[in-house]
Amino acid sequence: MKVDGVSYRPIWEEGGAVRIIDQTRLPFAFETTTLGSEADAAHAIREMLVRGAPLIGATAAYGMALAMREDPSDANLAAAWERLHATRPTAINLRWALDDVSARLRPLPPADRAEAAFARARAIADEDVAINRAIGEHGLTLIEAVAARKGRVNVLTHCNAGWLATCDWGTATAPIYMAHDKGIDVHVWVDETRPRNQGGFLTAWELGQHGVPHTVIVDNAGGHLMQHGEVDLCFVGTDRTTRTGDVCNKIGTYLKALAAHDNGVPFYVCLPSPTIDWTVADGVKEIPIEARRPEEVTEVQGLGRNGVETFRVVSPGSPGFNPAFDVTPARLVSGLVTERGVAAASEAGLRALFPERAAA
Amino acid sequence: MKVDGVSYRPIWEEGGAVRIIDQTRLPFAFETTTLGSEADAAHAIREMLVRGAPLIGATAAYGMALAMREDPSDANLAAAWERLHATRPTAINLRWALDDVSARLRPLPPADRAEAAFARARAIADEDVAINRAIGEHGLTLIEAVAARKGRVNVLTHCNAGWLATCDWGTATAPIYMAHDKGIDVHVWVDETRPRNQGGFLTAWELGQHGVPHTVIVDNAGGHLMQHGEVDLCFVGTDRTTRTGDVCNKIGTYLKALAAHDNGVPFYVCLPSPTIDWTVADGVKEIPIEARRPEEVTEVQGLGRNGVETFRVVSPGSPGFNPAFDVTPARLVSGLVTERGVAAASEAGLRALFPERAAA
């Protein structure tokens, strides 16, 4: 997608080096940086210069490639896996990418490993882009149907399931970018997404840079807008979807799904099929929800008179509690937009699109 | 209620002067200030040193008293009404209090007006306290019923319908303070309440000062907590309630009511009966919702390295939209806690408690 008129991905190769957008500086500064070593890649993941499951996976793969350029021995192959895995040990895609690259490199002679690792990292990124493009094309038909009926289409989204979280297009944003690029009059209501403000920071920034009309609202406002016909469609991403269609996503997604259901607004979840967890049947009961640092609730990052800093926004002495995700039951989800098409949010719906998954 | 162990009201008389808590300094500083003149009272209302409908009404009444002390003539009686009314011309309670005091003063000889105005201002404040105490007593029975069943009671509240918004006790907080003072183990989930953070700023501050256990959460988190049995009751306030029981309150109230309904959590609205608008039947269709300054969305006040300032928290260049209230349909409301008791959220329920209101 575009930044100031120039096409970017959040990770790319340039003159033999790996470069990324430093997302910790967004939205108040746009800076790119070079990953020149495995240590740089590890730092970028650990300190969240890159974030979003698919982008973390691609960055880890490039980290392995950089490690092989430094020392392609068996010992370093194993050690690099360990060092990179320790950066964000709970990230599923991180582990998947490290395992995938390691398994391909192990049989190779050390001298061939760096080149093979770069090729595989490039392929991992390209595969993610292809998946998101397919999600975008399926979601686009939903936007086109509304546009044909009424002209301007108002989409509401929560958090950042945008191109910054993937290798391009994003998941929830892919249909929006495609609609915009096709000339459809699409406008996006961007939920701020407290506590970390990924909506107001990242989604607003990337939509603005690409030229997509959008308006930031507080997380409290979406229900009111839906009551008054100001939202035609909701598109959100997901961290994990159960085989029954329950959706685990950023905290607050459930409240928007309730409002959409109450007002007859279609609520779609966009996801690459690898995020479907075929082992889980009941998302609310079975998925443990991580509580993050309470300081994310009691403090906010923002741009003040003296630059960007963290400031307190809760009465001093009052504690905070910070559940990071919630689960939206399948009954509130209009459909799951995958790279293979739009599935009903149910076990039958998902198995119909993914027949290779044997019944549990 | 208590501040650092000492009982306070947000407005009181002291040695012939009127004093208030300067709420613009909360929660980062506790300061009181003297209203020595009508101009001081007007400034306090205009600049929101006092806020909340009942407190604005009482402050306006004291403003009339201060005006009469300066010049009790007929001309100044009329002029003071105009000047005070202009401070927040859409505040219903402001106009009501000014009309009430003026009507009582007009027949009196000028020399008697200041004293009569002070007496009436005092009575307006005391009447508000009595109403809130009655709301608290009726709401307390709801908390006691939960406490009898399970011990600790978790209450969720949104925005600030606390003692700072009234002349004491608050509306939504009155049952909570009474339960706490009776020794019931009550804990409050305080919604931050973006964009103006009245929850994280004011509700958290006043609960903390009075010693009520509480935890601040982002507005996104309440649904998740209800899904997991962490909320026993919701108590919120209201700016305006229709005769059919629809509730207009701070933006985001509707989303919490949806979540409460979806999870079988009782959702109560606490209100003094003068806020019932007997002329409105359909809150969603008939109540116009004010859009406030978009800067309240794109900026936040907080305590940084250099003291309290306003910070940008949205991507530069991205616009915001700021609807201030939403309407919760009566079907989502478990009951309306009034000074006369708990009414069903319906026209029949309200008319049963307020039979003097002839059918429309």
Image (cartoon, coloured by chain):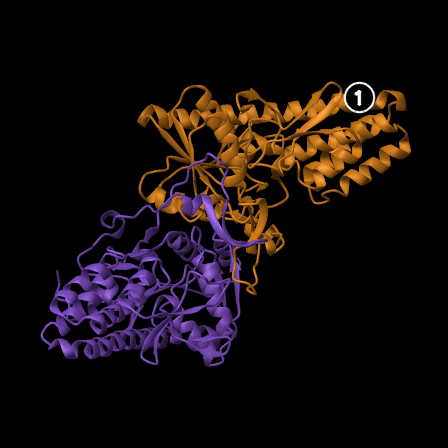
Chain colours: A orange, B purple
Displayed quadrant of residue B280: bottom left
Vertical placement of residue A24 versus B114, above or below: above
Say left or right for B284 vs A142.
left
Which one is nearer the viewer's eye here, A349 or A310? A310
Question: What type is the residue that disc 1 sits on?
Answer: Ala
Question: In percent of the image, x 11 and y 77: which residue is there?
Answer: B108
Q: For the view shown, which residue lies furthest in the left direction?
A: B107
Q: Where does the C terminus of chain A fall, quadrant-wise? A: top right
Question: In percent of the image, x 72 and y 25: which residue is there?
Answer: A18
Q: Where is residue A21 in the image (x, y as percent from the top left)?
A: 64, 30
Which one is nearer the viewer's eye here, A214 or A171? A214
The answer to whether residue A74 of the structure is visible from this angle is yes
The answer to whether residue A263 of the structure is visible from this angle is no
Q: Position of residue A122 (x, y in %)?
A: 70, 22
Q: Which SS class for mark 1?
A: helix
Q: How crowded is mark 1: few (under 14 residues within 10 Å), some or many (20 or more)?
A: some
Q: For the view shown, which residue lies furthest in the front direction?
A: B70
Vertical placement of residue B12 versus A56, above or below: below
Displayed quadrant of residue B88: bottom left
Q: Where does the N terminus of chain A fall, quadrant-wise? A: top right
Which one is nearer the viewer's eye here, A72 or B84? B84
Q: Position of residue B139 (x, y in %)?
A: 37, 72
**Label 1 lies in what chain?**
A
Which one is nearer the viewer's eye here, A94 or A342? A94
Question: In percent of the image, x 35 and y 42: which residue is there?
Answer: A226
Q: Identify the residue position indicated by label 1 in the image.
A: A116
